[in-house]
Amino acid sequence: NSVMKRSPFKHIRHVNHCVMMNKELLFKNLHNLANPSSCRVDSLTRHYAKDIFDGLDEEHLIEDYEKVDIDEKKGDYNELQPWLDTINNMSFDEFDAFLEEGGEALLKEENPEHPMLVQEMDDEIEEIIASKEDATSNEFMDFLNKTSTTTMDNEKPDKSKKDEPFIDDLKKAAREYNKNMGKIGKVMGIKSEDMKDDMEIRELFATVYDPSHIKQSQLEDQTLDITRKKFKEHIDSVKQRGAMGQVGASLDLISAWYDSIIQQIKRYQRLSVSDPDALPSTTYREFMPYISLLDPEKIVILSVQELINRMFQGKDMETPYVKLAFIQNKIGSLLKAQYEYDILSKIHKPSKSRIARARSKPTFHYLSTIHYEASKQMSENQELDEVLFQQIGAIMVDILLKHAEVPVNPDNKYSELVPAFEHVKKQLGKQSYKQVGVLTPSEALVNYMETRHQSMQVSQSFIRHLPMVLKPKDWSQVYDGAYHSIDSYVMRTKQSLIQKHVLREAVLDELFEGLNVLNSTAWRINPNVHATILKIWELGGGKVGMPSREDMPIPQTIPKNDPYAEKPGRLKTLQSRARRYNTNLHSLRCDIELKLDVAKQFCDEPNIYLPHNIDFRGRAYPIPPHLNQMGADFSRALFMFAKGKPLGERGLWWLTIHLANVCGFDKASFHERIDWVHARKKEIMASAEDPLTFTWWQEQENPLLCLAAAFELSEAWRLDDPSTFISHIPVQMDGSCNGLQHYAALGRDVMGGLHVNLIPSEKPMDVYAGVMDVVKRFVDQDAASGLSQAIAVQGHIKRKTIKQTVMTTVYGVTLIGAKDQIRRQLKDAGEVDEEVVDACALYLSKTVFRSLGEVFGSARAIMDWLNTCAQLISKHGRPVVWITPLGLPAVQPYRSLRKRNIKTIIQNITVVSSGDSEPIDTSRQTTAFPPNYVHSLDATHMLMTARACSKIGLDFSAVHDSFWTSACDVDQMNSIIRDKFVELYNQPLLETLLDSFRTMYPSINFPEIPPRGTLDLNRVKQSPFFFH
């Protein structure tokens, strides 16, 4: 252990020495290496050791060696001595030749009853074999120590030396080592297949020490250390403030105890009226009627929080306690203040205002203000004695002692419950022999708090995940993948135990394979884009989607041209608006700073990886939150593929089209886009040459993506043969309103398929313009019949007016939501009278839905059928569950969370009851199912495409319905996208869904699938604008 921190190789060499000699010993050494308490090694080494250790079967190993135990009748080993001397004097080459000439057979023939492979060898044989092993093991380990010392001592590596030669030499040494160990295996009688695992073990340990492994280990250790440190600082701060009752673990306890303790209080209140003798004690009988004057919810919140606050204030988790008399008085004092505050709120508003102003003061001052105001304003019959509330405090402590319980095992939902607090006698002070009554947390409560704090400090929500410099660990199980030493889970389950259970039972090999393709895509930070962003930020920001680094001035006077200048309080309104704007600016700046910080940290890395996991529908998301390819223009433009590829003629063509697409010129034919870019060649090259002076690129729809493409295209144009340029940026192929594409395919909808480019056309079809034309037709008809709303909007309907509503149809937008969307567009346009804008928005939203029904007839019928099925399921109190084509069980998590907002004098508490035991949210289960089902299908299509692209060597990434690859590979990816879409929808998806519903919910009578259209899906393969 003393040498492990600086040189783990000695320990690993010991493992290597014992491999051939005794596998049981190997098992023990790996256990030591994997155990954090027994070895000081970096987390990644420990992680690999644990993997190996977990994969070894101790009983099987021991059983194997028991079979070859030395016979009690060992015989005379003197006869073997000549052979031992011969072997001992051989070099490895001579030894190898000896074996090839039949030496192994001679050995066995000479002593047939005593095989060389035994658990406890004769000392002489063991010494020979060990020396043979040492000869190669020492050479290999010397090489490792020599080449890795600076890295393991945390010194900066020599950047002039590339990593590749080091890794190649390392692998070469490992192969040589394994070759020589194979020779040892021969003389020991071990078959080559039995040596395989041992060789893999050695290679695995050797690989740990390449530079990318070391750096990744340091990154993950650093991430966990920072998270734990910040969480500890937070908990320490909370303890010092006496506010432990306000942290997550305590709030969970309040939620868990809330209902049961309130029920006990109400039960005691009823007994105090109906049967006082049934109450536990005289104190209860005398003072329980007064508790009825208080709100039971506030009693519970104040009592539990004050007890936890005082018990853990400024103390270690090992020795928390609070004096019984002290906590009874404190709880009583708080309850008295709450009682007085509630009375004052009803009888004297000015007192309530003065108390509100004192709330920011220390608690003692705040409570004193309440008591002072109460003494002035309350009548004698309203005032209650302090002693009375102390007795109520004692009752509350007694109730908590009896009825507050915690699980013995916090991780087991069905664990036994035991009391959370204990009343014991304790000697306080060194000189005092007097014992006083104290309350202490039970061992189970301490364990609960520690477990919750440990899980919170390393939970997904607390950890600031970073990109990786080492290829992520392949997903092979739901809890095993992505980071190498940070726990990750394949699905963001929203704490649904049902989802976690069915996920563990599912066969997810195909889904894992698709996710692993996304994980294995190697990226780099685009240096040109990064440098431009930094310059703009240094100059004050405020451009290309970046917030300004300067706040908006707070106006001190009303502008002269303000149309609302005469409105009362106008200046305060303008000042409030400016402050709110500055607050939003601050949040945006923090977001940009986080992204730039991550980019700076990884800008020199040759390879960056973004590990992914999925939501319950199967949609993939990068785990690092701050900077990833799924962000907006700013984030996407910072990433480029680590591996560049020559453009070729087709790659040059697609890179040019990509530039037109990101500029917003994506509704034209491909040739028109090419011409559009060539007509702006001068501006493009000038922008790439000096992006801060020539700002043409800043005017485009996605300015930074435009700039990234301009950098590459301008460099290619400068070459004699532009097709030879090595391109790194990903070219994006986007679906045409992809949600409606999936609906049209489900319904085999010919008209809908035409509008979303499932059918070939000369130019890309614009679904929004198509729906707009139908809307205008209906509006003209209604206006002709004299409908006032139709007359008001006639001539004012634009593509932008209805675009958001059409787009969000697949997300289940409601009529009210659509009305709000269209109202905003009408207000912004200012062409409809403000007095009738609400009525016009409602009319138009209904008209858009009516038009969608005409354009997407079969698809709309499928959407309604899915909605009906979900409604039937949720009305029976069940969540909607389905299996995606990749075998992923999807469980909709929507439940009716019971939230109680309780306002006490100390703070406002929201008590939330959540989880699988809560009732189904019928409305959300119904409206969310159609879009969720379609999203599970678009996720399936993406992962199918990812797997197929990987198999032919394409770099691939995706943002839901936007698929990315290298420019030269776009043609191949486009072919795969279409093939996989057709393959997906040639499956009986709706029939399978209906069969699964009838199996899972046999008591429900589901309607039949609506009739579908006649769309030939194979036409998708010839549609150039399906994805474009």
Image (cartoon, rainbow, N blue to C red):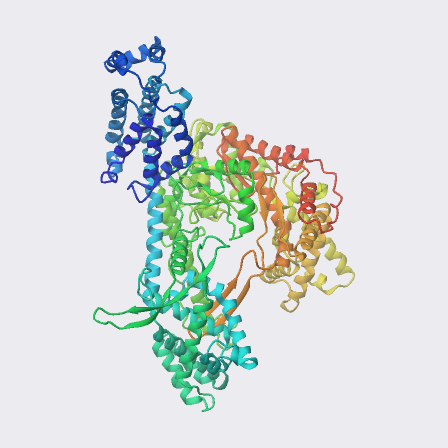
- Vertical position of residue 923 compared to residue 93: above or below: below
Q: How many marks?
A: 0
Residue drawn at x 72%, y 61% is 790
Name the side, left or right, on which 979 lies relative to 82.
Answer: right
Q: Nearer the viewer, residue 213 or 640?
A: 213
Q: Nearer the viewer, residue 373 or 670?
A: 373
Residue 737 showing in the rendered view: no
Rendering coords of residue 467 (x, y %): 40, 43
Q: Nearer the viewer, residue 254 or 641?
A: 254
- Vertical position of residue 764 compared to residue 324: above or below: above
Which residue ends up furthest to the top in the rendered image? 101
Residue 165 showing in the rendered view: yes
Which residue ends up furthest to the right in the rendered image? 785
Determine the image quadrant of residue 37. Answer: top left
Name the side, left or right, on which 200 lies relative to 895.
Answer: left
Which residue ends up furthest to the bottom in the rendered image? 380
Residue drawn at x 46%, y 82% is 287
Rendering coords of residue 610 (x, y %): 44, 41
Which quadrant holds the N terminus? top left
Which residue ends up furthest to the front in the rendered image? 73
Determine the image quadrant of residue 711. Answer: top left
Rendering coords of residue 654 (x, y %): 52, 34
